[in-house]
Image (cartoon, coloured by chain):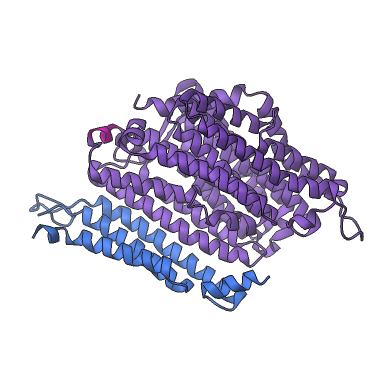
Chain colours: A purple, B blue
């Protein structure tokens, strides 16, 4: 039956296509292959999501080896949801890159770019689909190594130092995860996540297990840019090629959040995570600090991509807050925000990319008077910004609403102040950009830049329209997220 | 003595902290990569140590042997070693590019060049 092969196909297709891209040499052909593969991955992800919603978990055992011995891919509602986000964003970003990449990457390097891009996609999909802890580490490294390459391809030389810094911090994070997986194997003798989940409750008092948990949390924290481990993120997003910033901002940290969720709820179980370990308080404080400090620093940035990077740190803070509530509604808020933040940040970074191509810079001062010259791009940025703030009728509002409801339910009302303050600070930094776009006239009047190419605008508006769609029709996103949250929570309930 | 019975784990911790310290304290980009290598090597030893079954022979099937060491951690760490090599190669390649772009591989000099922009 082909349907049961889907989890493997999803990951293997981009993995095989990546070296083929390298052989093609032509940037255009490599793009064609990439978009084909990414679209197929999206179709598979949607099929998988429908399949798991109807029939429950889909399991694929590699080489026919049964679960605790062989590597299995186990797709349930939670990771099918994340797979769909990753494959969807990747496809939209690739639609954008047909023209976009030609602005920032030499034509001789374009096939290399798509090779790295597909490898990164493979890693992210693999991390999400796998049900094996060590396999997760391998895919984590595949996605990390290729994302260092992608970031270093940026036109600015600071892209190189940003990629180097990310490489150092990312490798430390990944090695921490490796240590944790080793320690888990030491006490349980298994690497399979479902098997681990069965064996760990009996070992809850083991010190090795606690050490493993600590290493794992810090390691994943580095990958998802949890405050104060976020230092690599703003530079990496600021100096990477614009297309890469959009892709990584919308997918990489999301997958890391998912991995944290999976380990905390699916493997260790919520009772160990929140009762035996003092993680609730730690995550809550760090999440709140991330929201406040990320948003505050964003207000003072002159480089718009750096500003959006710090804003990402703050948005990850919201996800961590939802997670730290240790309730189904909190987890639902985190998962909904996973989707919504991917849509808004992807849209915003792509809109900024359009401006950068036309105006030649991403500093705030470069954007003066863009409103008249690039009305569509500017409008897209405004709608994306409103969604980031959390204005009603946008996806961002739904995330905030869910989070506020979850906070009220669990009685941690001081967090409401943090959420409100974060939103106000978001208004401040988005307003700075809007003011520059609409209320300042351009410094130089010679040959006003025109609107971006339609093939760049279409993907931007696709994501922006999705922001509005998921702000109005929340049936699908919230329901799937709630089912996924119940599933993650119910493992040990 | 008991404290030294698990001496390989002491080696692991010593190597890990040494590597970690070099990554943090060194300002030279190549030395940072060396520190990172040490740090990863410590984890390799951790994995190899945990596969040892006391009294167990090398995991090669023979008729006279009853107890074998666990081969799985060795196989796992082989993968991690490959990942480590790839990371080192990529890190060093980045250092070469940084040296070409900035004319130095010292962190503080790179920083001051970026500040002066």
On screen, residue A140 above or below A340: below
What residue is rendered at 51% in x and 62% in y?
A: A165
Q: What percent of the width, then of the height, locates residue A355?
A: 77, 52
> Which residue is at 46% across, 73% downward?
B30
Can residue A41 be seen at all in this image of the molecule? no
| Image quadrant in which the C terminus of chain A is located | top left
**Most prominent secondary structure in the magenta stretch?**
helix
x then y, percent, for residue A286: 47, 44
Quarter location, residue A4: top left
A280 within the magenta span: no
What is the span of residues highlighted in magenta in the rendered image? A198-202
Frontmost residue, A360 versus A365 = A365
Which residue sits at x=63%, y=68%? A157
Work out whether residue A186 or residue A50 is closer to the camera in this orientation and state it. A186
Q: Is residue A297 above or below residue A459?
A: below
**Residue closest to the far bottom:** B103
């Amino acid at each position: 039956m082909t349907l049961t092969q889907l989890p493997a196909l999803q990951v293997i297709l981009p993995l095989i296509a990546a070296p083929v891209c390298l052989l093609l040499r032509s940037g255009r052909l490599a793009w064609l292959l990439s978009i084909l593969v990414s679209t197929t991955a999206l179709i598979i992800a949607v099929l998988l999501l429908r399949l798991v919603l109807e029939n429950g978990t889909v399991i694929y055992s590699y080489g026919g080896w049964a679960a605790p011995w062989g590597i299995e891919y186990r797709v349930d509602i939670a990771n099918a949801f994340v797979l769909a986000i990753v494959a969807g964003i990747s496809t939209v970003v690739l639609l954008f890159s047909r023209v976009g990449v030609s602005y920032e990457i030499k034509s001789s390097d374009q096939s290399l770019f798509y090779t790295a891009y597909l490898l990164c996609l493979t890693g992210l999909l693999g991390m999400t689909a796998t049900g094996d802890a060590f396999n997760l580490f391998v895919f984590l490294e595949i996605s990390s190594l290729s994302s260092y390459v992608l970031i270093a391809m940026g036109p600015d030389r600071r892209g190189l130092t940003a990629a180097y810094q990310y490489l150092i911090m990312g490798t430390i994070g990944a090695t921490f995860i490796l240590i944790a997986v080793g320690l888990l194997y030491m006490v349980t003798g298994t690497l399979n996540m479902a098997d681990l989940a069965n064996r760990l409750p009996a070992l809850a008092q083991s010190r090795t297990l606690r050490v493993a948990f600590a290493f794992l949390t810090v390691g994943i924290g580095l990958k998802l840019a949890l405050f104060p481990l976020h230092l690599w993120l703003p530079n990496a997003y600021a100096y990477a090629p614009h297309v890469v910033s959009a892709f990584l901002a919308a997918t990489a940290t999301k997958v890391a959040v998912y991995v944290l969720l999976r380990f905390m709820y699916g493997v260790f179980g919520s009772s160990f995570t929140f009762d035996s370990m003092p993680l609730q308080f730690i995550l809550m404080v760090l999440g709140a600090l991330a929201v406040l400090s990320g948003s505050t620093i964003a207000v003072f940035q002159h480089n718009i991509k750096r500003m959006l990077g710090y804003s990402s740190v703050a948005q990850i803070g919201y996800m961590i807050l939802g997670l730290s509530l240790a309730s189904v509604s909190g987890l639902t808020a985190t998962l909904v925000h996973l989707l919504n933040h991917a849509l808004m940040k992807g849209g915003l970074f792509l809109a900024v990319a359009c401006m950068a191509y036309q105006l030649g810079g991403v500093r705030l001062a470069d954007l003066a008077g863009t409103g008249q010259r690039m009305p569509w791009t500017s409008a897209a940025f405004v709608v994306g910004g409103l969604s980031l703030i959390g204005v009603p009728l946008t996806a961002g509002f739904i995330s905030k609403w869910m989070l506020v409801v979850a906070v009220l339910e669990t009685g941690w009302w001081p967090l409401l102040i943090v959420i409100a303050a974060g939103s106000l600070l978001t208004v401040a930094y988005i307003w700075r950009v809007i003011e520059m776009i609409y209320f300042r006239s351009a410094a130089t009047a010679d040959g006003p830049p025109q609107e971006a190419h339609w093939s760049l605008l279409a993907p931007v508006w696709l994501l922006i329209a999705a922001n509005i769609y998921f702000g109005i029709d929340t049936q699908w996103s919230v329901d799937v997220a709630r089912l996924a949250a119940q599933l993650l929570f119910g493992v040990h309930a | 003595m008991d404290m030294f019975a698990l001496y390989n784990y002491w080696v692991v911790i010593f190597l890990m902290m040494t590597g970690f310290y070099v990554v943090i304290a060194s300002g030279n980009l190549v030395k940072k990569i060396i520190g990172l290598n040490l740090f990863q090597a410590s984890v390799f030893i951790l994995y190899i140590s945990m596969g040892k079954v006391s009294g167990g022979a090398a995991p090669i099937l023979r008729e006279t042997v009853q107890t074998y060491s666990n081969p799985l951690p060795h196989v796992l760490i082989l993968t991690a070693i490959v990942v480590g090599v790839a990371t080192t190669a990529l890190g060093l390649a980045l250092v070469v590019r940084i040296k070409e772009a900035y004319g130095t591989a010292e962190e503080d000099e790179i920083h001051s060049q970026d500040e002066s922009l």
